[in-house]
Image (cartoon, rainbow, N blue to C red):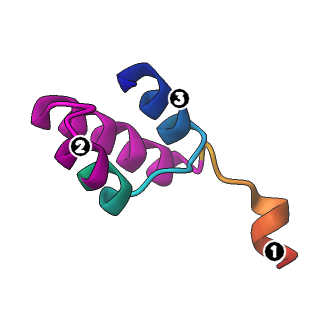
Amino acid sequence: MYECLVRLAKQGKLNKKLLDRALSKGWITKEQEEEILRIVADNQETGEGVNHDRANNG
Protein backbone atom coordinates (compact mmCIF):
# COMPACT_ATOMS: atom_id res chain seq x y z
CA MET A 1 0.00 0.00 0.00
CA TYR A 2 2.86 2.37 0.80
CA GLU A 3 4.22 2.13 -2.75
CA CYS A 4 0.78 2.83 -4.19
CA LEU A 5 0.38 5.91 -2.00
CA VAL A 6 3.85 7.16 -2.96
CA ARG A 7 2.91 6.84 -6.63
CA LEU A 8 -0.31 8.77 -6.06
CA ALA A 9 1.59 11.44 -4.12
CA LYS A 10 4.01 11.87 -7.02
CA GLN A 11 1.01 12.30 -9.32
CA GLY A 12 -0.40 15.02 -7.07
CA LYS A 13 -3.46 12.98 -6.08
CA LEU A 14 -3.02 12.80 -2.30
CA ASN A 15 -3.50 15.14 0.61
CA LYS A 16 -3.14 14.99 4.39
CA LYS A 17 -6.75 13.96 4.94
CA LEU A 18 -6.40 10.89 2.70
CA LEU A 19 -3.11 9.95 4.32
CA ASP A 20 -4.63 10.29 7.79
CA ARG A 21 -7.32 7.86 6.71
CA ALA A 22 -4.72 5.38 5.44
CA LEU A 23 -2.85 5.74 8.73
CA SER A 24 -5.98 5.12 10.79
CA LYS A 25 -6.71 1.96 8.80
CA GLY A 26 -3.19 0.68 9.49
CA TRP A 27 -2.19 0.74 5.84
CA ILE A 28 0.90 2.88 6.57
CA THR A 29 2.93 3.91 9.60
CA LYS A 30 3.27 7.46 10.92
CA GLU A 31 6.82 7.55 9.55
CA GLN A 32 5.59 6.51 6.11
CA GLU A 33 2.89 9.19 6.24
CA GLU A 34 5.53 11.81 7.02
CA GLU A 35 7.69 10.62 4.11
CA ILE A 36 4.73 10.77 1.71
CA LEU A 37 3.84 14.26 2.96
CA ARG A 38 7.40 15.35 2.15
CA ILE A 39 6.92 14.01 -1.39
CA VAL A 40 3.62 15.90 -1.67
CA ALA A 41 5.26 19.12 -0.44
CA ASP A 42 8.20 18.72 -2.82
CA ASN A 43 5.86 18.17 -5.76
CA GLN A 44 3.81 21.24 -4.85
CA GLU A 45 6.95 23.38 -4.71
CA THR A 46 8.20 22.19 -8.10
CA GLY A 47 4.79 21.88 -9.74
CA GLU A 48 5.37 18.21 -10.50
CA GLY A 49 2.33 15.99 -10.54
CA VAL A 50 -0.01 18.88 -11.27
CA ASN A 51 -2.18 18.71 -14.35
CA HIS A 52 -2.09 22.38 -15.34
CA ASP A 53 -4.40 21.91 -18.34
CA ARG A 54 -7.13 20.42 -16.17
CA ALA A 55 -6.64 23.04 -13.49
CA ASN A 56 -7.04 25.83 -16.02
CA ASN A 57 -9.94 24.31 -17.94
CA GLY A 58 -12.27 23.46 -15.12
Residue 25's disc is: 2
Is 29 positioned to the left or the right of 40 in the image? left
Residue 38: where, in percent of width, then height?
Answer: 29, 40
> Label 2 is placed on what type of residue?
Lys
Q: Which residue is mark 3?
A: 7
The residue furthest bottom is 58
Mark 1 residue type: Asn
- Name which residue lies at 75% across and 70% down: 55
| Residue 32 on the magenta span | yes
In terms of image quadrants, where is residue 28? top left
Query: Please, which residue is most extreme toward the left here?
Result: 30
Q: Nearer the viewer, residue 19 or 53?
A: 19
Instruction: Provide the residue span drawn in magenta.
Output: 21-47
Question: Which residue is found at the position 19% from the left and 39% from the top?
Answer: 34
In this view, the mark in front (3 or 2): 2
Residue 56's disc number? 1
Could you tell me how far apart the alpha carbons at marks 3 and 2 are, in whole angstroms?
19 Å
On the image, which quarter does residue 11 sit in?
top right
Q: Secondary structure at mark 2?
A: loop
Residue 41 in magenta stretch: yes
Q: Quadrant of the N terminus?
A: top left
